[in-house]
Structures are given as structure tokens and as C-alpha cells.
Amino acid sequence: MRLLVLGTGMMAKSQVAGFLAIDGVEVVGAVDTDRTRLDEFADHFNIEKRFGTLDEAIAWGRFDAATNVTPDRVHHATSLALIAAGKHVFCEKPLAENYAHALEMTEAAEVAGVINMVNLTYRNVAPLQRAREMVLSGELGTIKHVEASYLQSWLVSRAWGDWRTESRWLWRLSTGHGSNGVLGDVGIHILDFAAYGAATDIDHVFARLKTFNKAPGGQIGEYMLDANDSFTMSVDFANGALGVIHATRWATGHLNELKLRIYGEKGSLEVIHRPNGSDLRGCFGEDIESATWRDIDVLPVLTNYQRFAEAVRTGKQDDPTFRHAANLQKVIDLAIVSEKERREFNLLAADTPESTVGGQEPESKGDEQGPALALVV
Ligand SMILES: NC(=O)c1ccc[n+]([C@@H]2O[C@H](COP(=O)([O-])OP(=O)(O)OC[C@H]3O[C@@H](n4cnc5c(N)ncnc54)[C@H](O)[C@@H]3O)[C@@H](O)[C@H]2O)c1
């Protein structure tokens, strides 16, 4: 696969290191609107072809696929341009800023017949895949309750850099810069983690979002710090289980931790992923009486990068697809409306509000509303 990298910031470094480790993958070009960042990146990875705009790269055209590692608000227009040029697209999460855009990207990719995948990174967590298999094989029995959390602390620590001065953090705090806050940024990961691990779909959502004051006047330079920092969500799953899902950037003492607990009639599972590794524990059989939890062994799994490269090679679409990410985007959009209107939404019902499609700018997107849809994991 001849791969183009679009956006050469923080995540692109990790992505390209992953892609270059795969046999048969060549990174043949890089694009960034910031020339300094582009040159540093291309020098580091020894990439010869460098472009200041995607249009120039498409005009050159000598690549099979692109990985879109631009900020969230840039994904929509750039992915559509790549799809129109017949290129396979691996897009960073969240797929778009809102469901309407995500759906448009999905339909364009499906009509064009190009491979389309979204980097829901935590699919790479082997214990998550094992947990899903155990749920699907019936080992837990009927699932009754699910709890999932995504905890980060970068608003109270400098472990990843200083959000007060660095644009790569500031755009994540500002709706005007295309961010849906912690909900859009890592909420998409934990929604996927919960629904994928529990092997079901979210069909009802009620959410509370909170934006804490972080700077005088709620602003730093051009960035209005108005995107949510914390959310709590109660959900119903299609399998009948009830769930709580939450995330925050204020989890002092947790750099990056995802946790999923799935409680079934015959047993329970806990998946924990932290920067230093992942674990799966379970409580089954006689252990239920003494509430004894035991470690469960897991086998390594393929990464999203490996599965995208294989999908391009074979022409066979793999997960997570644009459509799956669009479905999760709908949960996010509805969570935002839920906070505004303080009411619950049924994702399968026809009563999804018009504002669902526009995220935090409902009035501008009213004519683009797609149909209510069932979530399919
Ligand atoms: N999957 C994950 O776990 C994960 C982790 C971190 C970030 N991300 C996602 O990756 C994406 C990028 O995040 P980041 O942290 O690398 O951001 P970043 O700000 O560090 O990098 C983005 C880069 O894109 C460039 N850019 C902006 N507009 C462009 C355009 N029109 N054409 C070409 N280049 C353009 C910027 O100059 C910058 O170099 C975001 O969507 C983010 O949500 C995903």
C-alpha cells in the first residue's frame, strides 16, 4: 500500500510508526498546511514528497490510500476529496463534527466502493476483543449492567504538555475550533469500548455535560474555552442492559485510563487499559459466591493499522467502518441535545430532534438531517 499522510501533528507520528512496521506499507507522501511541522515530520520519517495542500497531493495522485490525521473539523472536507479521487481512507476519530457530516462521508465512501475505516484505537486492546468474544459465546449469560469510564488528567497536569499555551490542546477545548469537547474527543472511544465490549448497541441516551471555567473570561487568545470537559451518560443497550458511561479531563491521577465492567447473570468481566498495559479479569461460577476475581489470559490482536492495510490489499472492508463511527456520532450529537433539553432520546425513534444533525450548531444544519437509524456494532 502506498500511503499518504494528511496532517503531520502529534497523532500522525504514532500512526506512521505503526504503519511503517507493516510489511508492504510505504509512506509515500505527507501533507500539512504548517510547513515547519511538515518538514520536521517528513525529515524524521524520510518521506520525500511533501505538499502544503491536499489538492496538490491529489493532483500528484501516486498513492493508494490516505490516513487523515487532521483536526476533527478538517476530516469531513478532506475525506470527501480523497474519496472523490478514488482513494481508500483511514480517518482519525471522531469521524466528523456531527452526524450529518459523518453520514455524508459514509455514503460517499460506500458509493465510491473505497475501503473506509476509523481509528477507534482501543479496538487494539486485546482484552477488549476477548471480552466481546466471551459475551458473544454466552459465558456471561444475560447482560444486566455495564459501566464504562475514560479518565484523563491533562487539565490538571503537564504530563502531555501545557494546554494553556499549546494549540494542539487548545483546539480541543473550543467548539469554535471544531471540538465537541471530551465527549467528541474521547467520548467516541469509550462509547465504542462499551458497546463493542458488551457486544450490543446503545439505543437510549441521557447525558449531562459540564464545562468548567479554566481561564479569565473563559478564553485564551483566539480560543474560547467553551467545549465540555466532563460528561456523564446513562444509556440503555439493545440487549436490555442498563449502562453508565462517563469521561473527564479532570481525573487527577489518571493519565489515560479506560475501564469497562460488564455484569451478566452467569459472570462478570472487567477490562482496564492504561498507558502501561491492559488487563482482563473475570468472576464466574463458584467465585461469584465469594466475589473472587481472576486474571484471564488473552492473545494478541491485530491493530487497526494492520487491518486497514490488509483491507486495502484484499479489497475486503474491515471494522470499524465509517458507518459505525457515524452511528456513534449520532449518540454524541444526541448527548449534546440531551444536555440542552434535559431529556432522554431514543436513537431508534423518529423523534430525534432536528438539532441532532448539527451538534452544537443546530440551526445551520436543519436541511441535512438523515433518517433515524439503528446502531449496528
Ligand atoms: N485515535 C486516537 O487515539 C487519537 C489520539 C490523538 C488524536 N487523535 C485524532 O487525530 C487527529 C489529529 O490530532 P493531533 O493530536 O495529531 O492534532 P495536531 O494538532 O497535533 O495535528 C494536526 C495537524 O494537522 C494539520 N492540518 C490542519 N489542517 C490541515 C489541512 N487542511 N490539511 C493538512 N494538514 C492540516 C495541522 O497543521 C497539524 O500539524 C484528531 O482528529 C484527533 O482527534 C486520535
Image: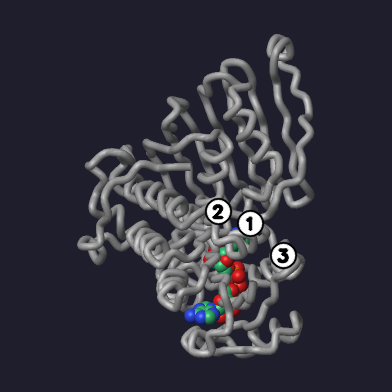
User: What residue sits 67% from the left and 67% below the top?
Assistant: 15
> Dot 2 corresponds to which residue?
318
Foreground pick, 18 / 312: 312
Where is residue 260? Give x, y as percent.
61, 36
Question: How many residues crowd around disc 1 within 10 Å: few (fewer than 14), some, or many (20 or more)?
Answer: some
Circles 3 and 2: CB atoms closer than 8 Å: no
Please tell me whether residue 169 is drawn above or below residue 267 in the rendered image.
below
Q: Amino acid at mark 1?
A: Arg
Q: Amino acid at mark 3?
A: Gly
> Dot 3 corresponds to which residue?
18
In the displayed structure image, the side of residue 161 where residue 358 appears, left or right: left
Q: CA distance from mark 3 to mark 1?
A: 12 Å
Circles 2 and 1: CB atoms closer than 8 Å: yes
Q: Picture quarter containing residue 363?
A: bottom left
Q: CA distance from mark 3 to mark 2?
A: 18 Å
Please tell me whether residue 119 is drawn above or below residue 238 in the rendered image.
below
Mark 1 residue element = helix
User: What residue sits 36% from the left and 57% below the top?
Assistant: 99
Q: Picture quarter containing residue 62?
A: bottom right
Question: How many residues crowd around disc 2 within 10 Å: few (fewer than 14), some, or many (20 or more)?
Answer: some
Q: Quadrant of ligand 1?
A: bottom right
Q: CA distance from mark 2 to mark 1?
A: 7 Å
Circles 3 and 1: CB atoms closer than 8 Å: no
